[in-house]
Image: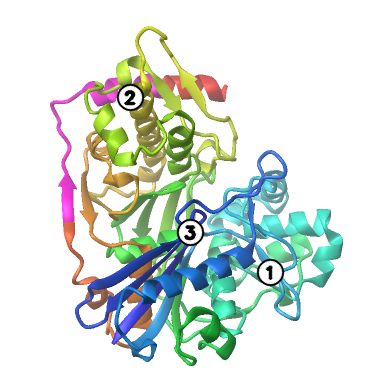
């Protein structure tokens, strides 16, 4: 038997086919090959068309199935991971009403800040674990205020993963984990956050029926089977946002375990067993995949919007045509730690929660025309993202997290030795690169939801550690370079 997983990112859709009994990934596919467009009609906006997501899911499924000689009836279950915090609006016919307002869109910052003030900081943090901030609930309020004709047509609001599951099964449902990431969930009362919906004047009936994270959430219907090549009746049995799913994929489900990823955005995600929050809401708490009211498991998420998107931008604008990221890494290896004083601040992808929702933009500092080369820019860009991780991790540590190991996947910025060694040295923490990814994790999650795996440990027991990075206590150049970068950031934030 096989398990199928999707990872709906903002850059592409990935799919993985996992052999259930061995836990081995037998096929992987990605579509499209180039990054999906992010629509920005106004500064700070970020939208994508959900119909494009669905088209790409159909294409990646067909691409995946060409790699293996199996009957699709051998696929026992399907799991979905997805970009968090997005807003998809559908009408009574399950038709999309407008492009999705995705995670890095910052148009609703002021709405969320006003709600934080009016509802009360203490109440929001105690019940929601967050400020309403720039999350899905605040984005919905923006639509209500600015697009009333569209708002009146809404039947249900969906997160991106809810939408994909709906296209596969015809059923519009959601999860507690998903509602918590949208800031729709009241952890103190263990129910939908009525007080925030009342403040925003949002009808509770817009929220779909709630299903458990690991459970049958619908079955492939005929139209989806024709579009994807899958078998009618195959159950969808797991869904989670990309960061909780990434943590689960890496085996991070217990208190004080930490996962990280460096994709379009950068994230450090740690698990705790009690409600926890930052008074300034610079880190965010969500229900982890194994959260239960009687046995809490909360994921504390530290996000850097300007991460891989900065490095991809630099590659597109400054690298020679056709160069790969591996070749860029080779070019920068002779450049010393600190890039000979060239420093890049990567916060150019919308409001940054670790900066209390400020949007300072990216910045290049201390450029010397007679000293710095293309390779210096490559190194300074990677170091700038790594320094951002470290800057944010200082906040995360105040919650009590003191991990000895950070686990990461093998398909993002942590493939870079320079990037990984910079973080390992500055945090004094070992980094383990695990041979897995979000799509494979979603597949294994479906194995729990369908009952093939008995528990979390069994689902991820076959994970293979690909490499490790250890801190070097004798190397102080990292700290010197970081301190200079941090001073630049402090000046920028004044």
Q: Which region is colored magenta?
A: 466-485
Which residue is labeled 1 in the image? Answer: 194
Q: Residue furthest top?
A: 370
- Mark 3 or mark 2, which is nearer to you? 3
Which tag, 2 or 1, sits closer to the chain's start?
1
Secondary element under disc 3, as helix, strand or loop, is: loop
Q: Which residue is mark 2?
A: 375
The quarter of the rendered structure image containing the C terminus is top right
Q: Are marks 3 and 2 in contact (CB under 8 Å)?
A: no
The verdict on residue 188 being magenta is no
Q: Quadrant of the N terminus?
A: bottom left
Q: Could you tell me how far apart the alpha carbons at marks 3 and 2 are, in whole angstroms?
A: 29 Å
Mark carried by residue 32: 3
Image position of 305 (left or right of 359): left
Rendered position, 137 above or below 346: below
Q: Is residue 484 within the magenta segment?
A: yes
Which of the two discs, 3 and 2, labels the residue nearer the N terminus?
3
The x and y percentages for residue 99 are 69, 60
Answer few, some or many: residues within 10 Å of disc 3's Cα (few below 14, many 20 plus, some between 14 and 19): some
């Amino acid at each position: 038997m096989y398990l199928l997983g999707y990872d709906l990112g903002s850059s592409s859709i990935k799919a993985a086919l996992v052999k259930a009994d061995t836990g081995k990934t037998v096929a992987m596919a990605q579509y499209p090959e180039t990054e999906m467009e992010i629509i920005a009609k106004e500064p700070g906006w970020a939208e994508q068309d959900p119909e494009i997501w669905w088209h790409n899911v159909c294409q990646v499924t067909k691409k995946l199935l060409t790699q293996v000689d199996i009957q699709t009836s051998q696929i026992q279950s399907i799991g979905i991971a997805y970009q968090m915090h997005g807003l998809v609006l559908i009408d009574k016919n399950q038709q999309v009403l407008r492009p999705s307002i995705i995670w890095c869109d910052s148009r609703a910052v002021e709405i969320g800040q006003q709600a934080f003030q009016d509802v009360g900081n203490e109440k929001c943090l105690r019940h929601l674990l967050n400020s309403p901030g720039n999350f899905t609930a605040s984005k919905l309020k923006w639509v209500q205020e600015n697009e009333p004709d569209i708002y009146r047509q809404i039947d249900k609001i969906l997160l991106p993963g809810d939408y994909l599951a709906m296209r596969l099964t015809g059923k519009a449902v959601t999860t507690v984990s998903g509602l918590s990431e949208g800031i729709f969930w009241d952890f103190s009362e263990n129910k939908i956050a009525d007080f925030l919906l009342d403040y925003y004047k949002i009808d509770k009936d817009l929220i779909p029926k709630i299903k458990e994270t690991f459970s049958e959430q619908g079955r492939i219907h005929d139209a989806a089977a024709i579009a994807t090549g899958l078998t009618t009746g195959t159950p969808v049995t797991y869904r989670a946002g990309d960061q909780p799913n990434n943590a689960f994929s890496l085996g991070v489900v217990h208190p004080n375990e930490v996962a990280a990823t460096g994709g379009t955005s950068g994230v450090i995600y740690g698990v705790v067993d009690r409600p926890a929050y930052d008074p300034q809401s610079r880190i965010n708490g969500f229900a982890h995949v194994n959260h239960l009211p009687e046995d809490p498991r909360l994921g504390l998420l530290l996000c850097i919007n300007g991460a891989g998107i900065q490095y991809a931008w630099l590659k597109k604008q400054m690298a020679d045509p056709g160069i790969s990221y591996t070749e860029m890494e080779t070019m920068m290896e002779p450049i010393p730690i600190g890039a000979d004083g060239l420093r890049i601040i990567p916060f150019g992808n919308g409001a940054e929660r670790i900066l209390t929702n400020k949007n300072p933009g990216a910045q290049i500092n201390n450029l010397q025309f007679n000293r710095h080369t293309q390779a210096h820019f490559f190194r300074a860009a990677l170091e700038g993202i790594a320094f951002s991780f470290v800057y944010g991790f200082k906040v995360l540590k105040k919650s009590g997290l003191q991990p000895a190991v950070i686990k990461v996947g093998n398909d993002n910025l942590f493939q870079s030795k320079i990037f990984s060694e910079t973080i390992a040295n500055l945090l004094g923490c070992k980094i383990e690169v695990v041979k897995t990814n979000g799509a494979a994790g979603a597949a294994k999650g479906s194995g729990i939801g369908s009952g093939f795996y008995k528990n979390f440990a069994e689902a991820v027991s076959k994970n293979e550690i690909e490499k490790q990075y250890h801190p070097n206590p004798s190397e102080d150049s990292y700290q010197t370079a970081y301190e200079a970068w941090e001073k630049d950031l402090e000046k920028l934030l004044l």
